[in-house]
Image (tube, grey):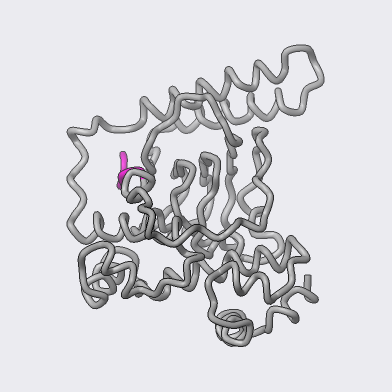
Amino acid sequence: MKLFTAPPLSQFAKPRTETAPAPRAALLPEPPSNVRIVPIARLAQGGRWRVEAMRALSEPCLLWFTRGQGRITMGGETRGYGPHNAVFIPAGVMHGFEVGPQTHGQAIFFGRGCDVTLPQTPQHLRIREAAPQSELSGIIEAVQRELDSTRPGSDRAARHHLGLLGVWLERQISPVADAPRPSAAKRLVARYAALLERDFRSGHGVSNFAAELGVTSTHLTRSCRETCGRAAHDLLQDRKMFEARRLLAETRVPVKQIADSLGFASPAYFTRAFQAKTGKTPTQFRRAG
């Protein structure tokens, strides 16, 4: 049973005009282009912020939860997840989810430039029947077996199994006609999430984003609280702080340059905002590894 879908966030991103602020340069390399299967519990190694903070990937991802429960936010909407939930996240969709000590499962990263036919929108599926549960687990095991193999044609075999995974997803997704139309609040927050992912480095505040969406800051914040239980400002800060922590943890880019790349007015303002969020200054966070 499909719990919810959201329109692909990229379709809401308005084309830039000549007067739009130029995007700031990304300071991190692109993720690997190869397929990977990673235990979900391992995703949080190095800090739970790596999965809980709002961010987007440049490759599709499938989360297959087999044990545990928590909450996941995709495109500005928060839902609970539990055992035998399959969550598909297209590239570019902002998301974050809780990982507790009892959370088990696998994350399948399809790599950049994946040519497998996959859903174009986020999908959250609760798989109740044993047969499709076993089928999905078997496909994932087959992909992993080929990725680990040194036999001729293993890469090609892995891609074929990924194709079957795409077919599995297609068969589990209910027809579009059966899906209820998202509420106005959900549609607004999905558009806001798309703008955040596009322009979180711009230095714009919630009022700027609200104006671009044609609503007031108050209405945008109220809609965010309704769909995901968080204020619009919190989503913006969460996205910026995830990027800041990732840059501090994975690069040696100077703090001043990180502050500038994320649109902060000064390094001092960035340091205060970062410390308020994490309890550490950027330098302390970097030294802690």
Residue 186 in which image quadrant: bottom left
Q: Is residue 95 left or right of residue 181?
A: right
Write the residue at 24% across / 73% down.
222
**Where residue 112 appears, x then y in whole percent?**
59, 36
Query: Where's the C terminus, which quadrant?
Result: bottom right
Write the residue at 72% across / 77% down.
285
What residue occupies the far top of the structure in this picture?
152
Task: Give 271 or 60, whichever is nearer the viewer.
Answer: 271
Q: Is residue 3 visible?
A: no
Residue 249 in which image quadrant: bottom right
Question: Vertical placement of 264 versus 158: above or below?
Answer: below
**Where residue 121 appears, x then y in whole percent?**
36, 40
Q: Is residue 246 left or right of residue 286?
A: left
Query: Where's the N terminus, which quadrant?
Result: top left
What residue occupies the far front of the structure in this picture?
18
**Where residue 130 appears, x then y in whole percent?**
44, 32
Task: Give 55 or 217, whichever is nearer the viewer.
Answer: 217
Question: Vertical placement of 172 versus 52: above or below?
Answer: above
Q: Is residue 86 left or right of residue 172?
A: right
Q: Is residue 218 visible?
A: yes
Residue 12 part of the magenta-drawn span: no
Question: Vertical placement of 183 versus 176: above or below?
Answer: below
Residue 122 in which image quadrant: top left
Magenta range: 1-8
Write the residue at 68% across / 83% down.
281
Q: Is residue 177 left or right of residue 207?
A: left
Across the whole image, how many numbered discs are drawn on residues?
A: 0
**Where residue 25 appears, x then y in whole percent?**
60, 57
